[in-house]
Amino acid sequence: MRINMPINNVERHVNESDYLVSKTNTKGVITYVNQPFIEISGYSKQELIGQAHNLIRHPDMPPEAFEDLWKTIQQGKPWSGLVKNRAKDSSFYWVYANAAPIYESGQVTGYMSVRSKPTREQVQQAEALYREMREGRCRFKIEAGELVPVNWFGHIKQIARSFTIKSRISAISCLAIISLSFMGGWSLLGDYQNKERLRDVYENRTLALIDLSTILDSIQRMRVNALTAANSNNPVIAKERFVDTNQLDRIFDENWSRYSVTSVTAEEKVKAEEFYRNVEAYRISRDKTMNLSIEGDFEAARENAVKYARPKYDLVHSTLIDLFDIQERQTKKSFDAAIEQLELLKISTIAIIVFFASIYLYLTRLLHRAINLPLAKSECYF
């Protein structure tokens, strides 16, 4: 693969309204470029025409991307993807490229590429992907411009692309069977009581667990900040830790407010109130440790952290773990109830799936006959 050097970290940007157009012959030699292409590449028209298109290839581009591009367009198919190009002055620019073969009298006589400005999000994703590909640790490969997992699912996608029209019609019909059958079965699950149970699992259990996890992380980081301040022997560091702790307090309050409005059992409510009282007591001792550190009295700060703040932190941590345990039990209870309801609906769901599958299999057979019979008859005339 051609490696164009040197390179630098200066980035050029394609104008929003510009489209970079180029044409090559079947060997990849440039036969046409438009003015926006010339301007951003930094080359003159004379320097570009007659040169191989890899003149602007950037060494950061993985060889696999260009191999897939040429493999795809040589099969008569279009290719799209993000490409990093190298300009004449060693700078670089990103484009979203759309390449396709040029046909004349039914024959491929060359290739054309039209490029536009990509979004920054697309560029960031492409940079990360191409870096992983160059380092040999990417879990994807490029097939016809698309990312395909390097696993059994990726192999299935490759096989699917090789299907004939007849096979694709069959596949679409099968997908229609599955979709319609599933929707028919799922409509039975619209039972109000079951929806409420599932919603309870999500809103009052799963989201509550997420909030509690964030609260646990905030409390732990508060403690680390207090210990860091007390042991830093540096008021500046102590002040920085104090500012970070204030931010953690806001995160704690936000998540606790959200958790507090969820549907809780009587047991959970009592434990939640106990937990919040413990947190308030811990905050007072924690703030005393931080303030003593900021004032430069680090010996007193360490003494306060060990004698007063640590026991209060242990109580906070203990009651928070109890809340996690309650959430886990309630989540299992709600989930088991929803599963039980689903089992009751299983038989009728299967019946609907079989009904729709029978209809669509029959329609698929008719579709095949409608396509194949006229073709079979036409063969008699040639």
Image: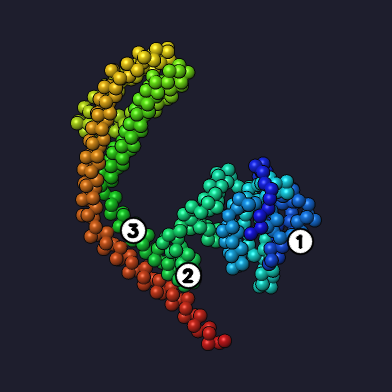
Residue ID for mark 3: 182
Up the image or down, 165 lies above or below 44; here it is below
Name the residue rendered at 23%, 60% in the picture: 347
Q: Residue furthest left?
A: 267
Q: Which residue is mark 2?
A: 163
The amino acid type of the residue labelled 3 equals: Phe
Give the CA separation, mark 2 to mark 1.
38 Å
Position of 259 compared to 332: left or right? right
Tag in front: 3 or 2:
2
Q: For residue 262, what is the image quadrant?
A: top left
Query: At x 23% / y 50%, what residue is drawn?
Result: 339
Total marks in image: 3
Amino acid on which disc 1 is placed = Gly
Numbered circle sitting on residue 225: none
Q: Can residue 121 be seen here?
A: yes
Q: Nearer the viewer, residue 369 or 90?
A: 90
Q: Quadrant of residue 77?
A: bottom right
Q: Nearer the viewer, residue 221 or 213?
A: 221
Of the numbered discs 2 and 1, the one sitting upstream in the chain is 1
Q: CA distance from mark 3 to mark 2?
A: 25 Å
Residue 50 numbered mark, or none: 1
| Residue 333 screen position, x and y as percent | 21, 43
Q: Earlier in the sequence, mark 3 or mark 1?
A: 1
* In front of the other: 78 or 358: 78
Q: Quadrant of residue 110?
A: bottom right
